[in-house]
Image (cartoon, grey):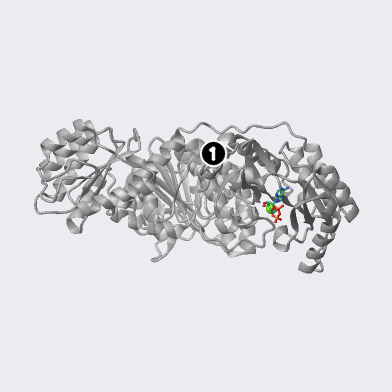
Amino acid sequence: MERVTDLFDPDRVAVVGATDRAGSIGRAVVENLLDGFRGEVVAVNPDREEVLGRPCYPSVSEVPGPVDLVVVVVPARVVVPVVEEVGECGIDNVVVISAGFGETGEEGARRERDLRAVAERYDLTLVGPNSLGIISTPSGLNATFVEGDAQPGSISFLSQSGAFIAAVLDWAVTRHIGFKDVVSLGNEAVLDEVDFVEAWGDDPDTDVVLGYVEDVDDGRRFIETTREVTRETPVVLLKSGRTEAGASAAASHTGSLAGSDRAYEAAFQQAGVVRADTVQELFDYGQVLAGEPDLSNRSVGILTNAGGPGVLAADAVEDTGLSLATFDDATRERLRSVLPRHATARNPLDIIGDAGLDRFEAALEVLLEEGDLGSLLVIACPTALFDFEEFADRLADVAEASETPLVTCLMGGESAARAARRLAERNVPNFFDPARAVQSLGVLAEYQQFRTREPATVERFDVDTDRAAAVLDRATERGRTQLGPEAMELLDAYGIPVPDGQLVESASAAADAAAHIGEEVVMKVVSPDIVHKSDVGGVEVGVAPAEASAVYETLLARARAHDPDAEVLGVYVQELVDVESGVEVIAGAKRDPQFGPLLMFGLGGVFVEILEDISFRVGPLAPAEARAMTEEIRSAPMLRGARGRDPVDIDAVVEVLQRLSQLAADFPRIREFDVNPLVAAPDGALAVDFRVTVDAD
Ligand code: ADP
Ligand code: MG
């Protein structure tokens, strides 16, 4: 995406709608550009001869000489003709700041469609409309109407909210955070977040991509593109909307649990994107990912002159999935030689409140040379024994020379703030809170794991697609959208093991089926109106064939008692499965509007919603992704064989997940389904109950 990065590197910028009028956006943009841009700024406005003392041209086509970027700040109704003219002139790059498009209703939406059509016709690289503008620090380009400016750095930042950019830039100044490029995406008529992630992935001056996103339009493209980028360049996104208004009436467990935030969570994970929950996290993570070398292992060393903060940091290490380094004898020996007698040579290494710079430095040297540390956190509280700013300089020297990631936590007020500035200037991540420092190291480990992950290749199984299609067609012909165990054939067609079973429509047929199936059977009422059969007494386990016809009547009577209007299709007579020998798990999928099939796995049974012990991935699932789903849930130890039980056949479960993922991908008309329970036993996995919702036509 070389062309997208061209946006940030123009020699000559024209502002259409440039004006002197105080308080106007047109003036703010020109002023920001004139302030520090190393290229040339040209004003365009048919009503003016001069803007801020510079010549002004009536239209883009009348500007003498080449123009590389056009910034549009004219009223919405004239934007399309202006952009058309830009295209006519053979200029590629446009930023439309003007608002009054899709965000304002019907007429605006039409205008936005027109704008997109023009951009496509001329193949324009267009940001906006309704964008706050773009910034690129190497050339001093600030084509925004934001107050203040960005400091140079190696973070490139995108935002779907303009207001958010304004706030972040302001705040970044106080934290001494610098940027390479910044873009406010506006309505994304042409370029969206994925285009910039992709472009910055190839930009040697961007060390990390940060972003604020509200939604992703094309989920598949997002995952596929971003997954490639994150192998080289870390991407951290702050995604709003973690708390969702309850999912609308869902017809399955998966449906009720698979909200869109779950899809984002899964997609980010699969794409190698680090998710931040707050602005602070966004920049904390950005800072460590931008500058720190790789961790050689997960052990963390903590060096401090104060006990309390050291313990806080140690607690955070446990919570983050990192480990506290242990010092070997040789290290302890050397540490003792640099520590006062009453200090103990263990991690966290407390060199005590009377430590001066020399002791700090001596201990640092030992830890870095001997410790075999994956990373090092230095915590310091201000004392009269050393100067914080001098300390910061020395720490930065050490950090620069070291192969081990080093982060700091200089606590305190005024003096700590001054020291923090020095550390920031030298790209040493510094935090005011030990737990945050540790969390950021955790993110470094998380990202490293992403990056070294095997590429995900999806396996395709040989399945009977036609037979599955026939099951769905039959349902559609009969006007059914809610199918239960009677649709087990769908699973069978996809090679997923199911117990023997049969739908019957009379008591005598039930008796025949039961006699045929086994010495004991399970009988379940089948009704599109009853989602959870056992809730209404609709499942009888361990029925002898002699009782089958009576149980048939009982089940129907219970269904009617529950809901006299429920449509009852009959009873499903099923082979009795030794559920006790395994673990009841759930495997399901739901079609997500952005990402397509979202697969779910978890602890199954009737308490799924209460336990919420579930994991998600966007399909199609690669084997490693399916396996990770089974490893992520809290109850994973139950699958591995807790309390003397045999471990379940995880490979079989993983294969079922992959086959379900294939089923969901092959039939977009399936809205959601779940297999609950899937009985995961030591000798295989068996789909015992099934529920599926399909589109009406
Ligand atoms: P629902 O989820 O609609 O209540 P299920 O078919 O999942 O109905 O049955 C509820 C429970 O009954 C299952 O979780 C399982 O414990 C038990 N069960 C269902 N089918 C069988 C079977 N074929 N063999 C043994 N137990 C079963
Ligand atoms: Mg069930």
Q: Position of residue 263 (x, y in %)?
A: 57, 50
Give the quarter of the image for residue 645: top right
Residue 332 in sight from this viewpoint: yes
The answer to whether residue 329 is above or below residue 273 is: above
Q: Residue at x 37, y 41 (%)?
A: 444
Numbered marks: total: 1
Q: Where is residue 625 in the image (x, y as percent from the top left)?
A: 56, 38
Q: In terms of depth relative to the viewer, which is nearer, 684 or 668?
A: 684
Q: Residue at x 16, y 39 (%)?
A: 363
Q: Residue at x 73, y 61 (%)?
A: 537
Q: In terms of depth relative to the viewer, which is nearer, 37 or 555?
A: 555
- On the picture, is 500 further left or further right than 454? right
Q: Which amino acid does label 1 sit on?
A: Thr
Question: Assess mark 1: CB under 8 A from ligand 2?
Answer: no
Give the quarter of the image for residue 552: bottom right
- On the picture, is 411 further left or further right than 441? left
Q: Position of residue 226 (x, y in %)?
A: 51, 40
Q: In terms of depth relative to the viewer, which is nearer, 68 or 252?
A: 252
Q: Which residue is drawn at 76% across and 67% down?
A: 562
Q: In terms of depth relative to the viewer, which is nearer, 525 or 540?
A: 540
Residue 563 in sight from this viewpoint: no
Q: Where is residue 146 in the image (x, y as percent from the top left)?
A: 39, 58
Instruction: Give the residue at mark 1.
Output: 225
